[in-house]
């Protein structure tokens, strides 16, 4: 029987554990914080819970467009805090029950490698050494804090201080305009706070399609969000009444609170990687297409692997690792194509994309066909009183194969699944056109864009 030790109980670790156990491995899962993963249950789930509440508040302000009397909703911060905790607890309990049912041994403690096949776990009850035939390192990441910032959890917050914060900000200064930053801008502006966003480059979401980023910027400006473009924060002053964020171009953003959303760093320190001969680059553990490190029986997955920092990607890595450890890769086995992973940003409008981007194709000189259809071309968008948005599909002009796409608007994270399947399965635009989709539905925009 394969002895499989997993360090880290997030999406990668718990998925690998359940799959490997089903395939007959003897699995031990070690987690120091919470089964389900700190990044998942302390970042992703709480943020999306609060965003959903913010979305409900925003919608309540637009219901006159649906023939209803307007009644403005207000946040009950204590009720929101309870709601977040209840969802976290439910998902945690659901996961531990699943692991128990698969016979996975769960240890709460801190683990480190003491050799290529040995793991030492320190728990409240003492120290235990475990021998392993295969090891998975899935320790996640933590918020990056620059030297000039000193979070106190009161005025200067990291992302993990804000689910929700001790008190609701009157004016929040968000530092960082990537995915996490813009989600926080959306969230707190929905709750009624004034928001200033520090944008280090000339567009929010610098890694995204400029047309997509522009749509979000327009929405933020309509919410009266202030954008400090081309500015890098370099100092935060705190006082009894608020904060002042100083930027490198001389501008100062003042508010009641500041929030750091400038990326994360991998949790690879303290794992004893040197003792096992595992190579590290910039804090990340490089992996091959099987998620193996330079030591063949030691794997890495999730944020610490340096691949796309998405829970969905981490879960897929965990499944593929379990299959590889148990020998299923010798049969039918597809490697993960990270370029075909779908992602979403839960702002308003919602944003989702997959595969090849229009700008990427132009940069490499690849010939593509781009088709775009606005949401308002569908009856469902008008029925929902939410016409803003569009669907864009990128395809090969010679073969019609779907190469990628972007969706901006309501339910984009759900609709992108159709394009993700098309990209993964090498389907053609004609395959989407020939599908009889529901009417009225937003998915009709996909068929229109595929024409």
Image (spheres, rainbow, N blue to C red):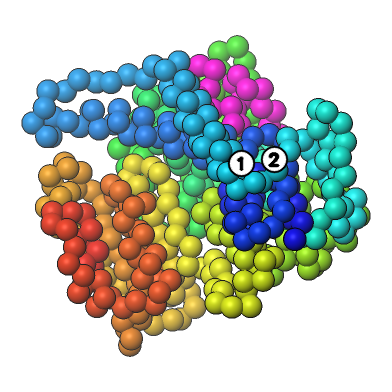
On the image, the x and y values in percent for residue 226 come to: 42, 35
Asked if residue 274 shows in the view, the reply is no
| Residue 154: quadrant of the picture | top right
Where does residue 9 sit, x and y in percent of width and height? 65, 44
Tell me if residue 411 comes above or below residue 167 in the rendering: below
Residue labelled with disc 2: 106
Is 171 placed above or below 449 here?
A: above
Please identify the residue farthest to the left as the structure is shown: 67
Choose between 426 and 156: the one closer to the eye: 426
Q: Residue at x 58, y 44 (%)?
A: 101
* Between 98 and 291, the one nearer to me in the picture: 98
Q: Residue at x 61, y 25 (%)?
A: 156
- Report the residue at 24% width, 20% height from top: 72
Q: Position of residue 117 (x, y in %)?
A: 86, 57
Quadrant hosting residue 332: bottom right
Task: State if disc 1 and disc 2 touch (CB < 8 Å).
Answer: yes
Q: Using residue 207 as the reference point, say whether residue 299 is left or right of it.
A: right
Q: Is residue 324 magenta?
A: no
| Horizontal relation, residue 110 to residue 361: left or right | right
> Is residue 237 found left or right of 284 in the rendered image?
left
Measure the alpha-carbon separation of dots 2 and 1. Answer: 8 Å
Q: Earlier in the sequence, mark 2 or mark 1?
A: 1
Is residue 157 a member of the stretch shown in magenta? Answer: yes
Q: Magenta segment range? A: 147-168
Q: Is residue 138 visible?
A: yes
Name the one closer to the observer, 397 or 362: 397
The residue at which mark 1 appears reads as: 100
Image quarter of the N terminus: bottom right
- The quarter of the image holding the C terminus is bottom left
* Residue 58 image point, x, y percent: 29, 31
């Amino acid at each position: 029987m394969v002895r499989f030790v997993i360090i880290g109980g997030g999406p990668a670790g718990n998925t690998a554990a359940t799959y490997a156990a089903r395939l007959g491995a003897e699995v031990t899962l070690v987690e120091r914080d919470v089964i389900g993963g700190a990044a998942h249950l302390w970042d992703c789930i709480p943020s999306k819970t609060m965003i959903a509440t913010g979305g409900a508040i925003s919608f309540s302000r637009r219901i006159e467009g649906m023939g209803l009397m307007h009644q403005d909703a207000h946040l009950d911060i204590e009720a929101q805090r309870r709601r977040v905790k209840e969802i976290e607890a439910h998902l945690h309990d659901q996961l531990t029950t699943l692991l128990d049912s698969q016979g996975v041994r769960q240890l709460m403690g801190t683990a480190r490698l003491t050799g290529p096949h040995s793991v030492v776990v320190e728990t409240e009850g003492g120290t235990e050494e475990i021998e392993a035939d295969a090891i998975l390192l899935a320790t996640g990441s933590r918020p990056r804090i620059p030297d000039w910032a000193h979070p106190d959890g009161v005025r200067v917050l990291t992302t993990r201080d804000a689910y929700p914060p001790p008190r609701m900000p009157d004016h929040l200064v968000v530092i960082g305009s990537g995915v996490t930053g813009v989600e926080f801008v959306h969230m707190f502006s929905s709750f009624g706070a004034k928001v200033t966003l520090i944008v280090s480059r000339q567009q929010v979401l610098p890694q995204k399609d400029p047309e997509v980023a522009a749509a979000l910027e327009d929405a933020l400006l309509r919410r009266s969000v202030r954008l400090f473009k081309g500015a890098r924060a370099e100092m935060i002053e705190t006082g009894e009444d608020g904060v002042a964020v100083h930027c490198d171009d001389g501008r100062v953003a003042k508010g009641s609170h500041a929030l750091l959303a400038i990326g994360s760093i991998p949790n690879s320190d303290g794992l004893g990687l040197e003792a096992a001969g595992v190579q590290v680059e910039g804090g990340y553990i490089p992996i091959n297409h099987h998620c193996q490190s330079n030591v063949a029986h030691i794997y890495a997955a999730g944020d610490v692997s340096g691949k796309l920092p998405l829970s969905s990607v981490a879960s897929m890595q965990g499944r593929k690792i379990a299959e590889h450890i148990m020998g299923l890769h010798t049969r039918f086995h597809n490697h993960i194509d990270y370029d075909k992973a779908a992602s979403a940003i839960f702002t308003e409008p919602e944003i989702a994309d997959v595969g090849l981007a229009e700008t990427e194709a132009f940069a490499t000189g690849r010939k593509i066909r781009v088709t775009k259809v606005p949401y308002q071309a569908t009856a469902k968008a008008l029925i929902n009183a939410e016409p803003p948005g569009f669907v864009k599909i990128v395809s090969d002009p010679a073969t019609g194969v779907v190469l990628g796409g972007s969706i901006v608007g309501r339910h984009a994270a759900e609709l992108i699944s159709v394009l993700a399947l098309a990209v993964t399965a090498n389907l053609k635009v004609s395959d989407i056109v020939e599908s009889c989709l529901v009417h009225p539905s937003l998915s009709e925009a996909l068929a229109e864009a595929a024409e």
